[in-house]
Image (spheres, helix red, strand yellow):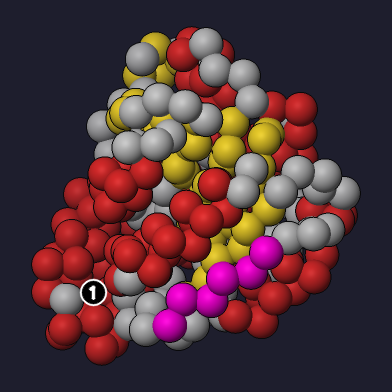
Amino acid sequence: MRVNEIDIAYDDKGSGVPVVFVHGHPFNRSMWQPQVERLSARYRVIAPDLRGYGETTVVPGTTPLSTFADDLFGLLDRLGVDRVVLCGLSMGGQIVMEAHRARPERVRALILVDTSPDAETPAGREVRYAVADDFRRDGMRPYADEVLAKMISPHNVGAMPDVAAHVMRMMLGTSPEGAAAAVRGRAERPDYLDSLSRVTVPALVVVGEEDEFTPVAVAELMHRTIPGSALAVIPGAAHMPNLERPDEFNDAVERFLDAL
């Protein structure tokens, strides 16, 4: 689909209340396969590849979270979809928070998975810009080797080889230029706690119990900040509970959606 001068690849399956799944970094829409398969039986599930990832156009430079959000709304406009449930993991969760901050009238409900609402620190910005340079110089392999056992728990790397292989394929298949652009954009992200404190739609916060990138304490902070929100902690999972514990993750999301 041509949107904002790029070609966006996406899955659109099922009917009913539209639920948009926004993938994290450095992944693509295939990370949501267990959710698309189960939830599309009762909901309209839309899962795009973000700008610079998967089969969507790579745009070098810097991609702010606001650009990702604009792409999402552009896709939804082309699909004729107005209000949606937005679900995002990690960077995808930050894109969801940006989308809500910018266009709250388009959001029917929020699902924030293993993500963080805070602005980047000065030290963190330096690290992200260095990582972006590393991607362009060295490709994705060194990063993928380093973070696999944090993306999914070390136990699951061995116990779930198919999941580990899928996560690794997604990371290695990501464009270094696309990943670098997104990392630079995240380095300049704002703080979302204020906009989260003014959420007036149903919200679910989900986190893997063993997540090192965005620990349970961060999810608890978002849960306390968002009025009336629900919190689900997924045992036996790290940063990608939707793949590590898909049944438990899907149960939590489906209960939330059924209550809308």
Residue with the most extreme front position: 259
Main SS class of the magenta portion in the image: strand
Asked whether 20 or 97 is in front, the reply is 20
Q: Is residue 248 left or right of residue 211?
A: left
Q: Eyeballing the image, is 253 above or below 9? A: below
Indicate the position of residue 178 as horizontal and vertical percent values: 38, 42
Q: Eyeballing the image, is 162 above or below 49? A: below
Q: Amino acid at mark 1?
A: Asp
Determine the secondary structure under disc 1.
helix
- The residue depicted at 71 percent of the width and 39 percent of the height is 100
Q: Is residue 179 visible?
A: no
Q: Eyeballing the image, is 190 above or below 62? A: below
Q: Is residue 240 left or right of residue 111?
A: left
Quadrant housing residue 230:
bottom right
Asked whether 113 or 203 is in front, the reply is 203
Q: Magenta span covers which residues?
A: 230-235
Q: Is residue 202 left or right of residue 49?
A: right
